[in-house]
Image (tube, grey):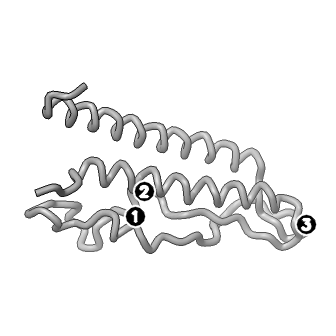
Amino acid sequence: MFETPEILTMAAARSSNASLRLSAIAANVANADTPGYRAKDGPDFAAAYADDDGFGLRRTRPGHLGGSARLAGQSLSERAGGHMSPNGNNVSLEDEMMRAAQIRQDNDLALSVYKSSLGILRASLGRR
């Protein structure tokens, strides 16, 4: 009866994904001058929710998709591409700052959705 609405679960998962990716960017910037360091990144939120069968997401009953369980196993991996410096490092500070701005927008979106959904729930309960 008192289950968390799926919209709140997805908003929290998106914010968690943004947090993971921002921590990877912080580590990349901190190691920008470390010889041999390879830039890392977490999976994009859409890729983490992608369905393997190619049909996309389709919720047929409560508890069917389990969004938080699907995102629980996220980990950082080496990011392919990028310009390799002579010391074997492929971190570009410009790219990292661009990624940080995009991920911050994702996090802001998740927080806005969460806040709006809570407002709707409060209004439906007669609270403000």
- The residue nearer to you, when weighing 122 against 91, is 122
Q: Residues within 10 Å of mark 1 (few under 14, many from 20)?
A: some
Q: Provide the residue designation for mark 1.
A: 48
Q: Where is residue 43 in the image (x, y as percent from the top left)?
A: 49, 63
Q: Is disc 2 placed on a helix, strand or loop? A: helix
* Quadrant of the snapshot with the C terminus: top left
Which mark is first along the chain, 2 or 3? 2
Q: Provide the residue designation for mark 2.
A: 45
User: 2 left or right of 40?
Assistant: left
Amino acid of disc 1: Ala
Residue at the image position 77 percent from the left and 53 percent from the top: 92
Farthest residue, direction top: 128
Which mark is first along the chain, 1 or 3? 1
Cα distance between the residues tagged 3 and 2: 33 Å
Amino acid of disc 3: Pro
Query: Which disc, if any, is residue 113?
Result: none
Q: In which quarter of the image is residue 87?
A: bottom right
Q: Is disc 3 placed on a helix, strand or loop? A: loop
Q: Provide the residue designation for mark 3.
A: 86
Q: Position of residue 7 (x, y in %)?
A: 26, 48
